Amino acid sequence: MLALSKETPAGRAARGREVTISKPEKELWSDFTKQGYADYLQAVSEDMLPWLRERPLTMVRAPDGVTGERYFQKAAPTYAPSWIRTTRIPAPSAKRDVDYIVCQDLPTLIWLGNQAVLEFHTAPVRRDRLDRPDLLVMDIDPPEDAFEMAVEVAFLVLEVLDDLGLPTGIKTTGGKGLHVVVPIERRLDQTALRGAVARLTAIVVERRPDLVTDAFRKVRREGRVMLDPSRNGTGATIVAPYSPRARADATVSFPVAAEELGSVSPGDFTVQTVPTLLARPGPKRWRALASERGRLPSALQRPE
C-alpha cells in the first residue's frame, strides 16, 4: 500500500482513495521499481498536477517497463475506479467518442503510475473549452547530440517573446530538445493559434536562418534546429512538465530557468534525480507561470 502523508496537501487530497501498488518490486526502468515510481510521482505531484488538471490526457503505457512493449492510450480503461475523472471528446476518424482521463489529483496520478503510464501528454486546452487553447508551445528540435544548438535557439525564441511582452517558461522535453511554453488567454481557436505560432516561427527563422528552420523533413534542415509549430494544431499534445519518458535513461521533462540553460543537459533530469532538484529556479518559475496569462498581439493574429 502506498503511504501518503496526511500532513501534506497531497496527502489530504488522497484521503479515502488509497491506491495499492501491484507488483511494487517490478522494474519499470533499470534499477527503478514501480514503488520507486509511485514515490517519484508523489514527490513531484504538487508541481506537476497544476499542468495536468482539466486537460485531456494521452498516455504512453509500458506494462513491462521500458524494455517491453509501449503504446499510446487515449481512452480511459473500463476498469478505472469510479473516482477517476474523464471527459468525452468526439473522434471523427474513429467514428466514436473517446473518454479521456483528466488527472485532477494525487490518487489519480498514483493510480496511473500503477498502470505503468510512463509518459503524460496533455492537450493545450482545458475540457470546458476544447476549442480555445490556453497554451502556446514553441517546440525546439535540434539535431542529435546538439543540445547546445537548442539552447541557442531557445534564447532567440525568448528574445522574440519578451519583445512581445508574453510570459514564458522553458523545459527540457526529456529527449534532445526544449519546449518554450506561453500561457495565453483563451481568445483564439486552434487553427488561428497555429497560424500565430507559424508567424512567430518565421520571425525567429528570419533572425538566424543559418541556425533555425521550420522545415519538417530532416533532409531539408541541413543540420539546423527545427521549430515545429504543429504542437499547437488540432489534436496536438505536449509532454507534461515532470513527466518521465519511456526511455532507457529514465529522463524527465523538467523546467529550467533561462540562466541555467548554458549549464544543463537533458540527462541531468531523471526519475532518480528530479525529486532532489525541485528547489531550483526552473520549478520556482513554473509555479508562478501556472497562474499567468498573456495576450497575443494583434499582428500575430492576422488572417493568412
Image (cartoon, rainbow, N blue to C red):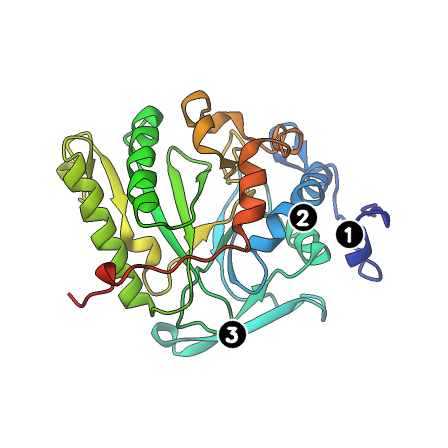
* Left or right of 101 in this view: 26: right
Q: Earlier in the sequence, mark 1 or mark 2?
A: 1
In the rendered image, the vertical position of residue 192 relative to residue 96, given as above or below: above
Residue receiving disc 1: 9
Q: Is residue 264 among the parts visible in the rendering? A: yes
- Image quadrant holding the C terminus, namely bottom left
Which of the two discs, 1 and 3, labels the residue nearer the N terminus? 1
Residue named by callout 3: 128
- Residue at figure coordinates x 39%, y 43% from the top left: 180
Q: Where is mark 2, residue-wise?
A: 46
Residue 212's x, y, as percent? 21, 36
Look at the numbered discs 3 and 2 and tell me whether their residues touch, using CB distance below 8 Å.
no
The kind of residue tagged 2 is Glu
Question: Looking at the picture, which amino acid does disc 1 mark?
Answer: Pro
Cα–Cα span, label 3 and label 2: 22 Å
User: Mark 3 belongs to which amino acid?
Assistant: Asp
Residue in the picture at 58% in, 46% down: 287
Quarter of the view holding residue 32: top right
Nearer-N-terminus badge (3/2): 2
Q: Residue at x 33, y 35 (%)?
A: 154
